[in-house]
Amino acid sequence: MADVLLGTVIENLGSFFREELASFLGVGELTQKLCGNLTAIRAILKDAEVKQITSHAVKDWLQKLADAAHVLDDILDECSITSKPCGDNKWITRFHPKKILARRDIGKRMKEVAKKIDVIAEERIKFGLQVGVIEERQRGDDEWRQTTSVITEVVVYGRDKDKEKIVEFLLRHASDSEELSIYPIVGHSGYGKTTLAQLVYNDESVSTHFDLKIWVCVSDDFSMIKILHSIIESATGQNPNLSSLESMQKKVQEVLQSKRYLLVLDDVWNEDHGKWYKFKFLLQSAITRKGSSILVTTRLEIVASIMGTQPRHLLVGLSDDDIWPLFKHCTFGPNGEEHAELATIGKEIVRKCVGSPLAAKVLGSLLRFKREKHQWLSIKESKFWNLSEDNPIMSALRLSYYNLKLPLRPCFSFCAVFPKDFEIHKECLIHLWMANGLLTSRGNLQMELLGNEVWNELYQRSFFQEVKSDIVGNITFKMHDLVHDLAQSIMGEECVASEVSSLADLSIRVHHISFIDSKEKLDYKMIPFNKIESLRTFLEFRPSTKKLDVLPPINLLRALRTSSFGLSALRNLMHLRYLELCHSRITTLPGSVCRLQKLQTLKLKDCPYFSHFPKQLTQLQELRHIVIENCFSLVSTPFRIGELTCLKTLTVFIVGSKTGFGLAELHNLQLGGMLHIRGLENVSNDGDAREANLIGNKDLNRLYLSWGDYTNSQVRDVDVARVLEALEPHSGLKSFGVNGYRGTHFPRWMSNTSILKGLVHIILYGCETCRKLPPFGKLPCLTNLVIVGMRDIKYIDDDMYDPATEKAFASLKKLTLCSLPNLERVLEVDGVEMLHQLLDLDLTDVPKLTLPSLPSIESLSARGGNEELLKSIFYNNCSDDVASSLGGIACNNRYNLKFLFIAYFAKLKELPVELSTLSALESIYIYYCDEMDSLSEHLLKGLSSLRILVVSKCPKFKSLSDSMRHLTCLEILKITNSPQFVFPHNMNSLTSLRQLVVWGCNENILDNIEGIPSLKRLSLDNFPSLTSLPDWLGAMTSLQVLQISRFPMLRSLPDSIQQLQNLQKLSILRSSMLLRKRCKRGVGEDWHKIAHIPALILESDAKTSFCENIISACNTGKQIWYRLQHGYTTTGEFDRLIEEL
């Protein structure tokens, strides 16, 4: 890090001297001497970096140099800020009393640090350090960067047998097990445990075998809440936003229920039996399918013995013969020519890797662009192999690090600020590098592009792994534990990434701090900030549930991420370059933020009350990125934002009616990434719209345009079609959306496939008066199309097609259609192949629609409409003689459709019997079908794969018929708010049924549910007049969880409940006071009946019941439809659709 820092300091000293500030402060000669000393030191820095490996004295000398350089850098940075003129007259500024005092203090501090650097410069002589030339970039080293935009992983070698053994266990030995199978993989770090688990996890046969796969990186913190949170997020793709352990447990059980799942717990260190057994019991209490399994990776044998139900799989190092192909692949490339002389040396290097794929990959990447024999020999004979404190794998990593160019080293070691196993956002990392001055400028190359080059080089050197890229190029990645250890060992005391408790004892030398919220109470006062000499970075990850009302007093900060809402301390953070406020209750930024002259990046995330910016924000002339996410109260963006000429990112721009808030503010900005323009109802004409110059912003990849309510707009009689025409973007967009557009037609450019050819996502929301859609069917890359709230369109695409040569919507995977009352067909023309890759179809209130055959459909949701819609779904596009048995989806998807959701079909009396041909169908949800009275015998006979059946809010629904016995795979059955329903007499034939939920039904419904052989979970809710539970309840000996809710007249529990010896949890919620009193622990009259049950919950308050949670979850998919029906604002929904993408 010293080289980059010294380069910055020397450059700033030069500017300091040239601008006559040094002479003005009386430190002119001192500045020249400092420049000379630091330049001389920098010349021998490369030699010092190498010698510190074996010399503690040199290492201490470098540390003292870094400490002094940080202090001098702070002084020079402060000087550059305080010397800036107030207004146009710099001489008045210089003689301002405050400026005079500041200069006096700066001069004094410079003299003090100069003395330290004098001593450091003299000390260098005794180490015999050799003067060397600071490395220059060679043209050849840059060429490989041109091909790094596509993220690829190196081929895995030598683990085929390991993979086959584990896959065979999961698919054969564990598949019929009622119990949860836990298979541990044990091996040294760097041997590829995680890679092996990933191979298994992504194996096609494993993906087919399991209904749900979940990956959780545990690391050394075996926190129940964190693991449950990760399970929910991995399974649902959404942050659960749950804080209590109880709510998370319920959600996990809901996610896992009736599924055969594979859970990978990667990098486990926990040796606490109690924590593991508690977690294991939670998983076992979920009602899952046979064969559910857990893969565990760990370095520790004791962890494997505690967790495993199967003998551990010991992962040994690869043989030299297996490692050589990996090394060769990394060195010569997949098709590169092998050099015989270099290969001989390479095989000797491979032997030093002691079986570690990680070491081979890192060293192979290091040598990839080296073709001289002496370069390979220098690696083979390096002194790093002989370091006593390092194992061979760490020696290989350290060797690769010291072969990085000096400017790249601090960028790598800075990554130690992130916790282990943390998913790092590439863009965020680059912004933090910028804030800390780690990116040395090179010509006119922008810092962001330079940061991208640095990241690519570190990635190509295999310092980063698990790289993921979305469709618009947003990249996340992780670091291997050993690579993180290397970064931390290099940083030493300079970097601390830990939980709150570890921050009470910090070194004076620490420059970067991050922490993760734990259960401990966070108080900034416990952190000794005052003793730290130059703290540059302070990052809160996973912000505290306790909202912090004050900022920490750290005046020298360059980068800050916090959830605090008391921001008065910002006025003292003059050095700040990066400010991220997340999950904060702020409503605005204080005016003092406008004095942060060095600020480059401003991020506001999940600040629900944030409404506006201070007016003088444009004083921040170095501001490059303004990122706004989930700030739904925001009503305006900064005044005259066009004056921020360095701005590269602006995720939200709100058009205002007043001067300084118009689209003209965007004209001269060169923006990239995402831009959502809101408030377009305030644009008075197309000329103003053209001022936005969207066509000139070539780096934008996501563009969203929103019109709001015209009620409050001062603009009238605007031709909105011409406004939208003038907002034409460039042709490189990946995602595009329009919200609230009031025109009758879309502009010409939206019909130009050469402009929209790269689009992957399109959202058209609330464009009510449009009569025709552009020819989206011809877009070759379109995978997700959402159309909501357009009353007049008849076709999704009415363009002409040649059936012989053209396909429509060739790449579309997901189609959402909502509130399109006159939509009749997908295409106007006949005979064209379309939607052949469609997997997910979501229909709401499209009563006139008829559909073509959908050969790949796996998930279908239909809400609102009539029987004709369902007929089109299941019958269309089949011949007359086939339509009676197989139609539409049924005709083409007997082996594909797995999920069916039907709701709000008011006149539907029964489901089409043709559904019985859908042999792959696993889940059926039926809601609000007022006339439906039963499911026919013929239908039930054919649903051989059905695992979940839910019927709710169907007032005339009476029965399932005795053909229930054919549902041999049924695992979850829920009947709610259907008062006429009665179970058939043969419920005991449902041998796979694990969970039964009955809510708000006829009280006689309980008569026929006895004798279900494998039932593990029974939930009974809302039986207001029932005074007793049946005695046969005690015969359900397989029950593990029993929940009784809203039984106000129930006075006692039956004696037979004592027979439920497998019952692990009993919940009695919102029932009579008498019953709760009788069940009181230790003293209640019924206590002896339930004393054997480990978990007892008695609640009288109005908390949401388990059943209500189920219904709420199922209703989530109907939110858009409800809001449109009730006239709710569309802005929030449109924003949420953008977030989902």
Image: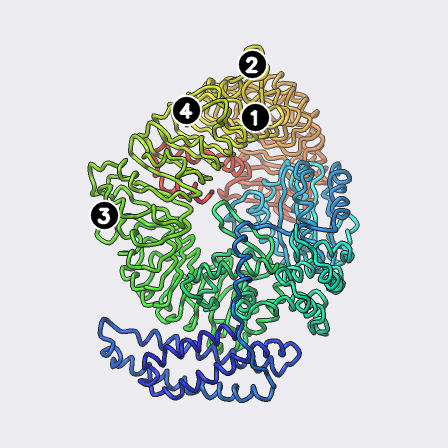
Residue type, label 1: Pro
Percent position (x, y) of residue 1060? 71, 38
* Spatial separation of the CA atoms under disc 2 and disc 3: 58 Å
Percent position (x, y) of residue 99? 29, 80
Residue type, label 4: Met
Residue type, label 3: Ser
Q: Are marks 4 and 1 in contact (CB under 8 Å)?
A: no
Q: What residue do we see at 59% from left, 89% from top?
A: 126
- Mark 2 crowd level (few <14, some 14–19, many ≥20, 10 Å Cα): some
Q: What residue do we see at 33% from left, 41% from top?
A: 728
* Pick the front one: 189 or 956: 189
Q: Which residue is mark 1?
A: 855
Q: Which residue is mark 2?
A: 883
Q: Are marks 4 and 2 in contact (CB under 8 Å)?
A: no
Percent position (x, y) of residue 150? 54, 49
Q: What residue do we see at 58% from left, 46% from top?
A: 234
| Above or below: residue 423 compared with residue 808 | below
Q: Which residue is mark 3?
A: 657
Mark 1 or mark 3, which is nearer to you? Answer: 1
Q: Which residue is mark 4?
A: 800
* Spatial separation of the CA atoms under disc 4 and disc 3: 42 Å
Left-right relation of 915 to 553: right
Q: What residue do we see at 42% from left, 62% from top?
A: 445
Q: Earlier in the sequence, mark 1 or mark 2?
A: 1
Q: SS of the residue at dot 3?
A: loop
Q: Earlier in the sequence, mark 1 or mark 3?
A: 3
